[in-house]
Image (cartoon, grey):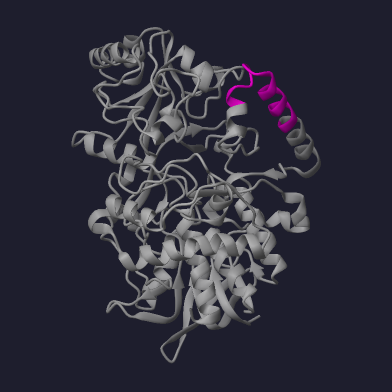
Amino acid sequence: MDMDCDLLVIGSGAAGLAAAVTAAHHGLRVIVAEKSATVGGTTAWSGGWIWAPCNPVAHRNGVVEDPSEPRRYLEAVLGNAFNAELVDAFLAAAPEMVGFFEDNTALAFDCGAKIPDTYSHLPGAGMGGRSVIAQPYDARDLGDAVQLLRKPMKETTFWGMTIQAGPDLRAFMTATRSVGSALHVARRLSRHVLELARFGRGMQVRNGNALVARLLRSALDQGVTILPGHPATGLISLDGRIKGATLTGPDGAVQVTASKGVVLAAGGFPHDLRRRAAQFPWPENHLSLALPHATGDGLRLGESAGAQQNTTLVSPGAWCPVSRVPSANGSTGVFPHIIDRGKPGVIDVLASGRRFTNEGLGYHDYVRDMLDSVPDGTPAESWLICDHRFIRRYGLGIVRPAPVPLSPWLRNGYLTRGETPKALAQACGIDPAGLVETLTTYNAGARLGEDPAFGRGTTPYMRLQGDPDVTPNPCIAPIETGPFYAVKVVPGSFGTFAGLKTDGHARVLDDNGAPIPGLYAAGTDMASVMGGYYPAGGINLGPALTFGFIAGRHAAKGV
């Protein structure tokens, strides 16, 4: 069964759905081809934050800034990687994108009014309002289409229930210390249990799952045709213009003719082992948080039409420290260490027992510093170290705080315990003398709320990651109440940065720098506008939605 449309979108994450909804709103007939059986891609597993400076949600919350400030900030962070065409296109369209989806679709946003940029000490850094997140969503509003919605990532949920950063997460972290928090958690858990019994999944979705659910609802409302289980295997070119693609469906090949062209948004190459081995540092030790189906299809399709991958970025991937999570069935999950590292009373050490980074900085910086610090010829790995007081108050990795028991994680080897720092070091394979000396030095400063070695807790971004109930420094507390615990951490990533070269209209470029007619790329199939840096939380989804919006609008109107 061959098909025709105006615009074919390959991939159904944030970028693909944004392109599809935008183009359909402007009158195009749109088909979304998705490789897997469900939609949402890695976006459905993400934290869902969207970096979109000067957005109208921030304005409503009293955050109004000069548009030149985020540009000045990106100039300071990106340095020689600053691409004026892409940055200016992104900064101009990001507020328009947020306003468009709010006014015309099922998307509604909450404001990250208190979330500062990562390098909040640099010129132009924002102190809040540049990030938005999709409001929680009742997935029952999808009707039967809820079966298309990818379930959230098991390791980052509580019994399959998504928990949103901010008041929701704080309530779960303080449920044993606050009556109000306990009531909030009880209400959420009881509703979730009822939904599991009735629907087989949680319906009150948050984070990236809420973003995808709202985009899916919007796509269906706009008449977008969605083809799950239809990977793209080749592009169709006619008279030098991309005019569609060949898909593989359950009954064989399907040719889709698309008069306005094709948008590549297939999720980058985090699981393309050949390309990853050539571009990633320590590829054999790397664990990706991205969807397993993201194997570089979009890049290969683009290259077949003359496109070029940008391999000059500072980092080819969006790094994140992760830990391996053993499951009872023998499989291994992956947990991202986003929240725990910044809390007071935890440090990270190498096999030498020495600290190597400011644990309160961004997750991308953590992995970069680990890769830079590991001696040649030794595995890229580190250990998060805490004491009993810390793990019962905050948890560690996938280990939840009290009253959830520690014993399952001790039994399966995820968590290591020692009655003394020396015993913990021996159990982990860490140099005991090095760890004891590191803890002695760290604790001497921590008792005063100081971190002379790395300056943890000295910027607004770091302090946001801490615990406001801990003074004088919300990011620092001694590690001295045994027993002691450790979780091994290795390099990981949310996805890839090194996508195809594009212009400010999201048009894919050939080896001469000219646009390939009818071919667009967005999300991680497009080389990151951030040049391989990580200036703020949400710099994956913000550009993904924005350049998806740009691609859909350009395909419809030529602008």
Residue in the picture at 28% in, 35% down = 370
Residue in the picture at 57% in, 83% down = 257
Instruction: Write down the region rendered in magenta.
Output: 172-188
Instruction: Establish if 338 lies above or below 253.
Output: above
| Image x and y of residue 539, in percent | 43, 52
Residue sitting at the far bottom? 239
260 or 344, which is in the foreground?
344
Instruction: Establish if 392 lies above or below 399.
Output: above
Residue 28 in the figure: left or right of residue 341: right
Total marks placed: 0
User: Residue 146 magenta-drawn?
Assistant: no
Residue in the picture at 66% in, 60% down = 216
| Image x and y of residue 144, in percent | 77, 57
95 or 118, which is in the foreground?
95
| Image x and y of residue 291, in percent | 51, 51
Residue 343 in the figure: left or right of residue 439: right
**Does residue 49 appear anywhere in the picture?**
no
In the rendered image, which quarter contains the N terminus? bottom right
Residue 347 in the figure: left or right of residue 432: right
The dominant secondary structure in magenta is: helix
Q: Specify the quadrant of the image occupied by residue 91.
A: bottom left
Q: Specify the quadrant of the image occupied by residue 221.
A: bottom right
Residue in the picture at 34% in, 49% down = 124
| Image x and y of residue 506, in percent | 43, 71
